[in-house]
Structures are given as C-alpha cells and as structure tokens.
Image (tube, grey):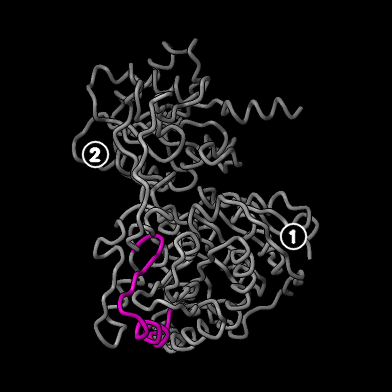
C-alpha cells in the first residue's frame, strides 16, 4: 500500500476513511480541526459522499454521530478536550445506549495550553463513561488505532475514544495505508429500544456495562497495544502512556538506558498486567501526558506497596507537556545547563489583524462605556478575545463557549448595569443562543454584541452556521425589532457606531447589536482565489 507523510490529525482522517466511515461530525477546535478538514478535502470522501459538514457544536456533533451509528453505519466525532465538556451529556450516555455501527470519538488534548483555557485530560471522561480508550504514540499508530477503534466499537457495541495530544496532532511522519474497507450497509438496531434510557432499561444497561469491563481489560491485553518490553537494568521500570513512550525512547537511545518498559496505548488497563510488570522492578516511573490518571490508579491496583514516581510526587511537573528534557530529569540523567538566549527580538503577544472588524467594534464600545466605568464587558472564545490585551483592555471575562451572554445576564441580575456581552457569530450559534433566550424570557437588561466576521476565524476560517442567519435567529428568539441593530464596524462610521452602542446601553431590556464585517483573512483568500 502507498506511504504518505501526514500530520497525526491527517493520519486519523485517512484511517477513518479507510475504515469505511460514512460520516464525520465536528466543531472546529485546535488541535483537532485538521482531522475533519482532511476528510472535507479528500477526493475519496467526495466520491463516496461521506458526510463531512461542520456541526453547530460538539454536543450536536456527538448526537449526530450517535444517530448515524443507530442507522448501522460507521461515524467519527472529533473535538478538542474542552469540546468534550460540551458533548459530555451525549458522550457519557452513549456508553449506556451502546452503538450499532462503529463510533469513534477523537478527542485532542492540549497540555501546556497552546490554544486552550485549560489542559484537562480526556481519559477521565473515558474512564467515567467506562468505554475503551486508545492512545497512539505515533502517526502510524494513530492511523492503525483509528481503524482498529471501529472494529473494537462494533465488537463490544460501545463507542471508543481515541485520545491524542497537540504534539502528535500537529507533527508529521510517514504513514503506510492498509486496504480500504467498504462502508456498512444501513441496518437498524436488532433491539429497537436499545437507545431508550428510561430508568428501568437504563438500570439493566448499566449492569451490562459494568459486566463488560472485564472483557475490555482482556481485550487490552490480547490486542497487543499494551505490552511489556524486557530490559537489562531492573532498578527502574518505565510505564509510558501514548506519546510519552516516544519521549522515553528518544532519551533511552541517547543515554543507553536498558530499563524494562510497559507501553500503554489501550484502556482500561488490567491490574494483572500492571502487577506483573511492577513485581520485576525496584522503582516505577510513570510517564503520561496530562493528568496522573494511571499513576493514581496504581495505589488501589498494585498488590503490594512499590516506589512509584511521577506527577504525584513531583518527580515530573504537575502541569505542562512532557518532553525529552523532563524525562531526563525524572530519570536523573545529566542535562546541559540552559543557555541564556539574547534578546534579539522582543516577544510579541498575539494581536488582532490589521483591518479586523473587531477593532472598530471595540473602539465604539470602549468610547460608549466611558460614562459608566470599567468592568462591564463579558466576552467569549474567539479572535475577539484578544480584546483583553492592550491597547484595547476591553473585556473582563473569557470562560467557555457561550458564557459571555449568560455571565452578562447573571451580572445584570446582581445589579450591574449596563452589562455587555461580546460574542462571535460562530460561538453564538455554538452555545450563545440559549443564553440570549434566557435573557429575552426575563427581559434582563443586557446588551449583546455579536461581532460577526462570517467565519470561524480563530481556527482558520471554517464555515460558520451563523452566516446570513443572525437577524432571523435573534428575531426568532424574541429580541424586539427596534433593539435588534446592525453595525458596520469601520473607522469612518465610528461616531454613528458609538451612538448606537450608547443608546442600547441605556435601554433597560435585551438589545442585540450585530457588528458585521467579513474576516480580513478570509476576504483576502477569497479575492486571491478569483
């Protein structure tokens, strides 16, 4: 079969196509975005009519993927780690309903928070849902585990999580493809009540899920993805999970280490495998990217007390990514003293692009708020979050997708007037609409500014569900016509825009201002493509 040089994300996309998927469902989120984009651009996917449109948010993606599985076909759902919080309701319950067609949920974690507001470890969710979790160490493994994940899903009639991290998602390596599998034929569940979680059947399903755990543990041994590599020096034993296995191997080759290794790429991990390995060594070092999930489990798993080093005892830093330098320090290997890098170019924080409509929106908002004082603007996740930085210093919050509207409402309920929400068009349709509905129902005095650049700009310019729909959506949610305003965020309209914002700040009810101007980056690409 042909060999390709692919990003980890792209390897997963190709693995899913070669596994016979009929659809991928996702909302853009770094570092997972390129998986869906790869499928969207694939000639094979187009010829097969594989569904590959963006979803409104991760919850709708998860539910649509589960619906495709209900119909017997293979589906993949992709998201970043914080997106799994949004999808959690459907994700957790999918472990109870089970699946019909294979369902793989790819979650890309972001340790060190390169482009995220936290560095949570999605393996927690896999353990909570009691479903299999796969964790590749290389791009080739990412490809192969994606294919295996669909087989595993159908074997146990459960969704399967594929957990990756930023470095694997965004680095390239050679990947060899396997044979293409045909798509499943549409087939309804044998039990048409399988997906009904009323209390009585749900209790039975939960018992079945619990009873399946022993079989899943056995599968994680027989699959060969978890295995022990013998060594010569048994003073230490290394347990390496996913990508951390690569870091250890790099250090071991350089330093001539001969420790035995237990490579972990599939969960749940059987206690017998852990005990068999630990009994051979004097001291255990656990290397895992993210939280000390496996390390914490060892306390209740091991038959006797062993010396265990990892994130819990400070051997490895509790936060941030692993890398070969961290591994060297944990294994007491001498490292070079860090060299001081001369300041040739000053660090530059990220900034809004020149010509960005968000700039003129913030300038109008800032001038209109001068009469009220600072601390009144609740924002959201998107390019416009850069309004927190100088020279704007315009916003006071960024918590999660959609929180701007609901936090502004809560602050208004507490007596803060005016209270302003700034949210992007894609974020609004992702999870801002329900908060606006709450405000409309109670006629809460809030001013919501939807900064509409007609794209999902922060993740590279994917299509936005909001494009050409915002006015109708806001009307449908009950916003009064006279307080549903449109702004053209250009410098020449500054006085007019400032007065518009000032008028709505003074209104004691719900007002929405749509500041609409196409993203300067997507506009430039559109012009160049002509």
Q: Viewed as shown, does residue 390 lie left or right of 8?
A: left
Task: Check disc 2 and report its element: helix, strand or loop.
Answer: helix
Q: Position of residue 100 (x, y in %)?
A: 60, 77
Badge 1 crowding class, 10 Å Cα cut-off, few under 14, some 14 to 19, many 20 or more, is: few
Q: Which residue is mark 2?
A: 411
Q: Viewed as shown, does residue 335 lie left or right of 197?
A: left
- Quadrant where the C terminus sits is top right
Mark with earlier residue (2, 1): 1
Q: Position of residue 73 (x, y in %)?
A: 67, 71
Residue 405 visible, this angle: no
The magenta segment is 268-291
Q: Residue at x 39, y 47 (%)?
A: 113
Residue 156, picture quadrant: bottom right
Q: Which mark is residue 3?
A: 1
Q: Residue at x 65, y 73 (%)?
A: 71
Q: Residue at x 24, y 25 (%)?
A: 374
Q: Viewed as shown, does residue 432 lie left or right of 189?
A: left
């Amino acid at each position: 079969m042909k060999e390709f040089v692919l990003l980890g994300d792209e390897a997963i996309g190709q693995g899913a196509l070669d596994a016979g998927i009929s659809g991928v469902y996702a909302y853009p989120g770094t570092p997972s975005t390129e998986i869906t984009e790869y499928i969207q651009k694939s000639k094979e996917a187009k010829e097969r009519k594989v569904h590959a449109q963006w979803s409104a948010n991760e919850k709708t993606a998860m539910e649509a993927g589960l619906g495709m599985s209900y119909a017997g076909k293979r589906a993949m759902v992709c998201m970043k780690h914080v997106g799994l919080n949004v999808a959690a309701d459907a994700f957790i319950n999918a472990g109870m309903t089970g699946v019909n067609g294979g369902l793989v949920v790819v979650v890309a974690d972001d340790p060190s928070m390169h482009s995220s507001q936290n560095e949570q470890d999605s393996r927690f969710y896999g353990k909570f849902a009691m479903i299999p979790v796969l964790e590749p160490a290389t791009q080739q493994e990412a490809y192969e585990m994606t294919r295996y994940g669909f087989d595993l899903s159908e074997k146990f009639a459960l969704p399967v999580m594929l957990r990756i991290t930023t470095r694997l998602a965004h680095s390239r390596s050679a990947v060899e493809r396997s044979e293409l599998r045909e798509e499943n034929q549409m087939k309804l569940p044998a039990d048409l009540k399988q997906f009904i979680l009323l209390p009585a059947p749900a209790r039975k399903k939960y018992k079945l899920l619990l009873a399946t755990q022993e079989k899943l543990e056995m599968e994680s041994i027989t699959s060969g993805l978890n295995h022990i590599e013998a060594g010569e020096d048994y003073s230490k034993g290394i347990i390496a999970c996913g990508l951390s296995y690569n870091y250890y191997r790099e250090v071991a080759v350089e330093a001539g280490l001969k420790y035995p290794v237990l490579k972990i790429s599939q969960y749940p991990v059987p206690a017998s495998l852990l005990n068999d390995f630990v009994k051979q060594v004097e001291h255990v070092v656990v290397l895992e990217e993210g939280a000390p999930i496996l390390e914490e489990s060892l306390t209740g798993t091991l038959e006797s007390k062993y010396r265990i080093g990892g994130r819990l005892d400070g051997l490895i830093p509790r936060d941030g990514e692993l890398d070969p330098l961290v591994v060297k320090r944990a294994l007491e290997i001498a490292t070079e003293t860090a060299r001081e890098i001369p300041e040739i170019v000053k660090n530059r924080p990220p900034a809004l692009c020149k010509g960005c409509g968000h700039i003129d929106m913030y300038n109008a908002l800032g001038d209109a708020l001068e009469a009220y004082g600072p601390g009144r603007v609740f924002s959201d996740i998107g390019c416009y979050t850069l309004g927190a930085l100088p020279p704007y210093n315009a916003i006071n919050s960024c918590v999660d997708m959609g929180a701007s509207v609901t936090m502004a409402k809560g602050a208004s309920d507490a007596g803060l007037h005016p209270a302003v929400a700034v949210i992007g068009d894609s974020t609004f349709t992702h999870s801002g609409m329900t908060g606006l509905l709450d405000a409309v129902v109670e006629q809460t005095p809030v001013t919501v500014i939807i900064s509409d650049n007609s794209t999902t700009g922060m993740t590279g310019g994917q299509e936005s569900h909001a494009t050409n729909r915002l006015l109708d959506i806001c009307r449908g949610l009950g916003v009064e016509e006279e307080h549903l305003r449109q702004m053209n965020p250009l410098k020449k309209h500054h006085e007019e825009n400032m007065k518009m914002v000032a008028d709505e700040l003074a209104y004691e009810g719900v007002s929405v201002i749509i500041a609409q101007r196409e993203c300067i980056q997507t506009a430039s690409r559109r012009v160049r493509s002509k």
